[in-house]
Amino acid sequence: MHSVSVQNLSLKFGAAEVLKNLNLDVEEGEFIVLLGPSGCGKSTLLNCLAGLLELSEGQIHIKGKNVTWAEPSERGIGMVFQSYALYPQMTVRGNLSFGLKIAKLPKEEIEKRVQRASEILQIGPLLDRKPGALSGGQRQRVAIGRALVRDVDVFLFDEPLSNLDAKLRSELRVELKRLHNRLKNTMIYVTHDQIEALTLADRIAIMRGGIIQQLDAPQTIYNRPSNLFVAGFIGSPAMNFIKGTTVGGGKAFKFGDVTLNLVGYEGGAIMDRPKAIIGLRPEHLAIVDEAVPGLTIPAVVEIDEPMGADSLVWLEAEGKQISVRVPVEHRPVAGTKVHLKVDIAKSSLFDETSELRI
């Protein structure tokens, strides 16, 4: 039995189809991240799971129970929104306990749950403060705690860290990972931040236009993207894309005067394709002094962007812009003629017409 199961879900707003025949199974205790650009349908899907939107077609099952038409309070879920949505006139204790009081839980049980949540989230000293006296990170902890006290099986997070500054976002990301490791509850998390997705998720569902493009482990998505969109969306700095053709029975990739040997590519049978695209991540390229036939691309250094521990070097090769990640102490001088060594085993090939991985 899946913890959450979405079956043939479609959602329309008038003539606009926002979610299209979507299927998703989430295992017990899994941390799933819904990732994609604005307007891809990720928050809409989360709201459908929460019962805040009525489906056009399809069904939703939580813990084996069909909750398609159930009220949000009957679904056994806890939700954390992008905005903290705390009651300003109540203390932290009041915010945590309010929903439990409405549910008419015994006073002892309410106190027990509030105490447990405050210990897990380390907000015990804040229980008698009001939201106005808290920092953004503390407010978000309280918002998470309000979901936590409900003692549910499934937690839904709708971009909970997007209102925080970069340092605080990084700290709370670690806290969320610790929280999941401790509780082992099923968590479904919406974000447009790929770093959050890669660091938090057991599996990532990359969405575009109301359709899941790829659902897989973070490293699989990073190393073997299923199509051109996924390859371009995941990775910072972005993957380099070079248009060309596969020749020699699919044993080489040719663009301009450069021919790259494809022996070692893990995509299986390639065949000759008149329109193909090779994707090369900046960290899978190396700057070398000498050419190696079939393995290097001649290039000229243009500029570099120091990024702290390393540097992003931009080069021109056959009229194309290519970025390479190098140690900051090995930055080449602008105007230098070099060669880029390609790690074919870590490259990605796509058919230009279908945009699917070869």
Image: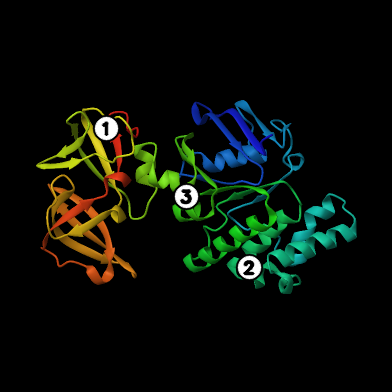
Residue 352 circle label: 1
User: Secondary structure beneath disc 2?
Assistant: helix
Q: Position of residue 226 (x, y in %)?
A: 39, 37
Whether pointer 3 and pointer 2 mark residues with C-beta atoms closer than 8 Å, the reply is no
Q: Residues within 10 Å of mark 2 (few under 14, many from 20)?
A: some
- Tell whether 36 sits left or right of 82: left
* Amino acid bearing label 2: Gln
Q: Position of residue 171 (x, y in %)?
A: 54, 66
Give the CA separation, mark 2 to mark 1.
48 Å
* Amino acid bearing label 1: Glu
Whether pointer 2 and pointer 1 mark residues with C-beta atoms closer than 8 Å, the reply is no
Indicate whether 354 appears above or below 89: above
Q: Residues within 10 Å of mark 1 (few under 14, many from 20)?
A: many
User: Secondary structure beneath disc 3?
Assistant: loop
> Residue at coordinates 56% horizontally, 39% vertically from top-left?
44
Give the CA separation, mark 3 to mark 2.
22 Å
Name the quarter where the N terminus is drawn. top right
* Amino acid bearing label 3: His
Question: Which residue bears the numbered disc 2?
Answer: 138
Question: Which residue bears the numbered disc 3?
Answer: 192
Q: Which is more N-terminal, label 1 or label 2?
A: 2
Q: Which is more N-terminal, label 1 or label 3?
A: 3
